[in-house]
Amino acid sequence: MIVGRAEELAQLERLLGEVRAGRGGVLALHGEAGIGKTALLRAFGERCGSGVTLLRAGGVEAEAELAFSALSDLLAPVTAELAALPIPQAAALGAALAITPPQPGDRLAVCVATLGLLRAAGRKRPVLALVDDAQWLDAPSRECVLYAARRAAGAVGFVIAARDEREAAADSGYEDLPALRLGPLGYEHSLEVLRHAVPDHVSRVAHTLAQAAAGNPLALVELPATLSHEQRSGVAELDPPLVPGRRLRLAFDHRIGELSHRGRRALLVAAAYEGDDLVTIAAACAGASTSVNLLAQAEARGLARLSGERLAFGHPLIRGAVYQGAPAAERRFGAPPVSDRPRLHSAWLHDQVEPTLSRVGDLKPLLRIWFPLFDGDLGKRVSASRYPVCTENLIWHAEVKPDSIGDEGRPEQVVL
């Protein structure tokens, strides 16, 4: 089932019509991880019918160094057409696909032979090549696919799907192809996906999940499985930031792992802060032995967007992936040694923090980073605020000591 992609399917079917009419064509399908590129390619392939030769291949990260592995998958159904090629081309392509004995490589010969093979197959009936996860194609296969796609004509067509958030996207070679960008689903379509994924969903929970997923179909499918039964039924509250499901988290983790150590720490500071003010984030980064300037690494990989004095995550769920994926020691970055932690009177905390809560709204998010949560009315107010705090998220942990209770039954001091 595919939801909310009628316009994109119509555009792909127009390409199919051009291929059937002998005019060829190519579309580069772009979009973030989990946005539905694979599902769209599958749905489109099912609509092509038996009158079209469908060729399929997909990049596999683990095979990105295995030369011609993707090209071998793509051309397997039409290798019988090698006999129609000139002998030098047939020999070069046959050797690349491990069909004939190895021979010294000739990159141009393999590229030209790939195009010739597709054209030979197209003379019998239309050929449509569907290539998924092109960002992970091995380099020789990518070179051949792009060579043939740029020259697609006659009864040959290509649809190439690739993620568009990687740092090297501008140099991938796909940017000069006609593009079809896959954007997020609308709110109503997001709810429809959730209804299929969780038929007995609670409306309030579905609204929260739809907002967290931001129109990403994979997130919509995976998020319900990350919740407890009580959370799905609306009995228990959802604790933001929500963490993506396994497949989407793997996609985010891969990019997070490409950052330097201090770059990851800067992104963790931003994730722990629920606002978007870069000045505040810069101050917190300085206190955590990193620099806000290192967020440029995250921006280059589509994890964050920097605009003026504001920061936004590339997807709302990246915040949860960054925070939950960080080691516990990193979550407590910047905490001074216990011996250096001040002993503060509770009266001072109430005098200083309460006015901050009521008068300085922009500083509320700092509670998530710098202020401890302790029992009592103030703790309840912080927990119920727009910026929820949980013990796991705090850098400094507060504990009201039993022996600090005075004669009047109130804490006289709090140890940070």
Image (spheres, rainbow, N blue to C red):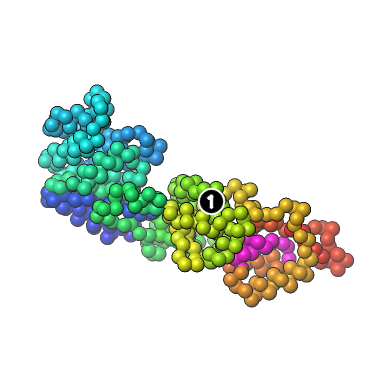
Q: Residue at x 63, y 53 (%)?
A: 333
Number of marks in the rendered image = 1
In the displayed structure, would residue 104 be above or below residue 368?
above
Q: Is residue 376 magenta?
A: yes
Residue nearest the viewer, comparing 216 with 263: 263
Q: Residue at x 18, y 47 (%)?
A: 152
Residue 77: x and y in percent read 22, 35
Residue 313: x and y in percent read 47, 59
| The quadrant where residue 238 appears | bottom right
- The residue carrying mark 1 is 264
Residue 102: x and y in percent read 26, 25
**Main secondary structure type of the part rendered in magenta:** loop
Q: Residue at x 63, y 60 (%)?
A: 369
Considering the image in quadrants, where does the C terminus appear? bottom right
Q: Residue at x 75, y 53 (%)?
A: 338
Label 1 environment density (alpha carbons within 10 Å; few <14, some 14–19, many ≥20): many
Residue nearest the viewer, comparing 75 with 101: 101
Q: Amino acid type of disc 1?
A: Arg
Q: Is residue 104 left or right of residue 341?
A: left
Residue 140: x and y in percent read 29, 37
Q: Is residue 330 left or right of residue 207?
A: right
User: From which residue to which does the magenta span run?
Assistant: 364-377
Q: Is residue 96 visible?
A: yes
